[in-house]
């Protein structure tokens, strides 16, 4: 079964609004990552947060991690139409093998 | 850097035919992953290699699927015989394991349709 589960499955917002996506996972982790997938393309790494970190920023992205609740959130501020994509969280299940398990993803539509 | 290169990008084949998907990982990466993506099942890890050695193939659906990595710069995923339910996007990805983050770099995928 998938390690990460995203919520919501789909999100539609207007350009300029903020978008928040959540991810829950089941086992302990070393780190959690977020990836983006544009339609018809491969996944692209966005940001990584380690298990001892609570919050991380990268440009318009803000990621939080709550290991006690086994959950993470991805916030995209001031969204743009170009942010339209699917977003996936991925966890390593505390292994050091490099193996990542992905959630089902959140499909984000940003309307211009 | 050329990134992860996959071929073919698109393939349509008839049920029962053999399908071979190819992947060239990023130079210097020591881990290689094959994922399958479908609407119903999402992104599934099929198999991954570390230093050309298969580490975990528990995600391979059945004996019709096989994967090889004869050297650090090439891997194949073979389906024989193919079935319509194998239709999916197959992604190859690579990473530098042990780099403290294991960021995975994906190819653009091979879109397989079995009719």
Image: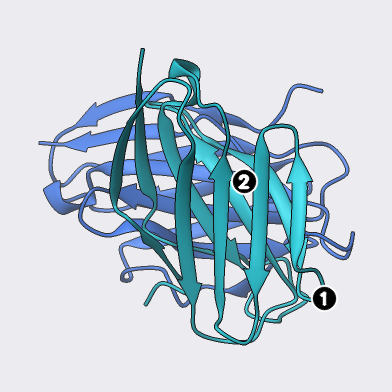
Left or right of residue A83, residue A5 in this image: left
**In the current view of this chain or complex, which residue is farthest to the top?**
A112
Q: Distance between the residues labelled 1 and 2?
A: 26 Å
Q: Tag 1, which chain? A: A
Q: What residue would you read off at disc 2?
A: B93
Q: Which chain is blue?
A: B
Secondary-structure class at tag 2: strand
Color used for chain A? cyan
Q: In which quarter of the image is residue B112?
A: top left
Can the viewer see residue B71 in this picture? no
Kindly identify the residue that appears in the image at 67 percent across and 33 percent down.
Answer: A60
Judge by depth and name the residue closer to the eye, A30 or A62. Answer: A62
Disc 1: CA contacts within 10 A as few (<14), some (14-19) or many (>=20): few
Q: How crowded is mark 2: few (under 14 residues within 10 Å), some or many (20 or more)?
A: many
Residue at (57, 66) in percent of width and height: A72
Residue at x-position 56% and y-position 46%: A75
Screen quadrant of the N terminus of chain B: top right
Between marks 1 and 2 in the image, the one whose residue lies nearer the viewer: 1
Q: Tell me, yes or no, if residue A86 can be seen here.
A: yes
The answer to which image quadrant residue A61 occupies is top right
Q: In the image, is A62 to the left or to the right of B41?
A: right
Quarter the C terminus of chain B occupies: top left
Give residue A15's position: percent from left, percent from top: 42, 20
Residue located beneath label 1 in the image = A52
**Whole-percent x and y of residue B77?**
47, 50
Mark 2 chain: B
Q: Which of B85 and A110 is in front in this view?
A: A110
Q: In this view, does A83 lie to the left or right of B103?
A: left
Is residue A28 rendered to the left or right of residue B42? right
Percent position (x, y) of residue A35? 57, 45
């Amino acid at each position: 079964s998938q390690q990460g589960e995203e919520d919501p499955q789909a999100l539609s917002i207007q350009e300029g609004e903020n978008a928040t996506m959540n991810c829950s996972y089941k086992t302990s982790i070393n780190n959690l990552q977020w990836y983006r997938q544009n339609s018809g393309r491969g996944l692209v790494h966005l940001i990584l947060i380690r298990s001892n970190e609570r919050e991380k920023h990268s440009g318009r992205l803000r990621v939080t991690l709550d290991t006690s609740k086994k959950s993470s959130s991805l916030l995209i501020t001031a969204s743009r139409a170009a942010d339209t994509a699917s977003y996936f969280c991925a966890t390593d299940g505390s292994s050091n093998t490099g193996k990542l398990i992905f959630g089902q993803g959140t499909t984000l539509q940003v309307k211009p | 850097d050329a990134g992860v290169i996959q071929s073919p990008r698109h393939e349509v084949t008839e049920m029962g035919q053999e399908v071979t998907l190819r992947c060239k990982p990023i130079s210097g990466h020591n881990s290689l992953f094959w994922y399958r993506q479908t609407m119903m099942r999402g992104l599934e890890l099929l198999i991954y290699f570390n230093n050309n050695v298969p580490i975990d193939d528990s995600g391979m659906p059945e004996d019709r699927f096989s994967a090889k990595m004869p050297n650090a710069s090439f891997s194949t995923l073979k389906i024989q015989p193919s079935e319509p339910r194998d239709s999916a996007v197959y992604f190859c990805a690579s990473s530098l394991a042990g780099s403290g983050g294991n960021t995975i770099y994906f190819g653009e995928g091979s879109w397989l349709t079995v009719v």
